[in-house]
Image (cartoon, grey):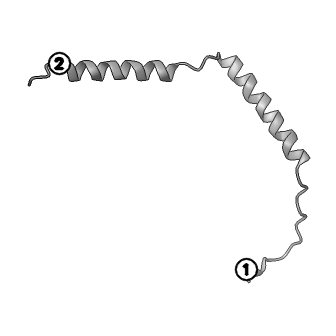
Amino acid sequence: MTRGNQRERDRAKAQKAEQAKKGKTGKSGAEMLRDKDKVAEIMRQKQEAGEPTRPFRGGVPSLLR
């Protein structure tokens, strides 16, 4: 084998880079939770402001008859 341990070194380097990429969110748990709640509240407001839903008229849809 002419490459020696180059393959193992490259594999270890790639794993180390992948671990560094995975672990960084930049926010603590409390900050992530606060942001999640903020986005959820915005979505609730958007849903309330959107089109009103059609009332249920009862019966079976024509496709299922």
Residue 60 drawn at (x, y percent): 79, 77
| Label ID, residue 34 | none
Quarter-wise, where is residue 56 in the image?
A: bottom right
Asked whether, in this view, residue 52 is left or right of residue 26, the answer is right
Q: Please say if 39 is above or below 57.
A: above
Identify the residue at image location x=84%, y=40%: 44
Q: Amino acid at mark 1?
A: Leu
Quarter of the image with the C terminus in it:
bottom right
- Cα distance, mark 2 to mark 1? 66 Å
Closer to the camera in the image, 3 or 26: 3
Q: Please say if 4 is above or below 42.
A: above
Mark toward the viewer: 2 or 1: 2
Mark 2 crowd level (few <14, some 14–19, many ≥20, 10 Å Cα): few
Quarter-wise, where is residue 5 in the image?
A: top left
Asked whether, in this view, residue 54 is left or right of residue 20, the answer is right
Mark 1 crowd level (few <14, some 14–19, many ≥20, 10 Å Cα): few
Residue assigned mark 2? 5
Residue 7 drawn at (x, y percent): 22, 23
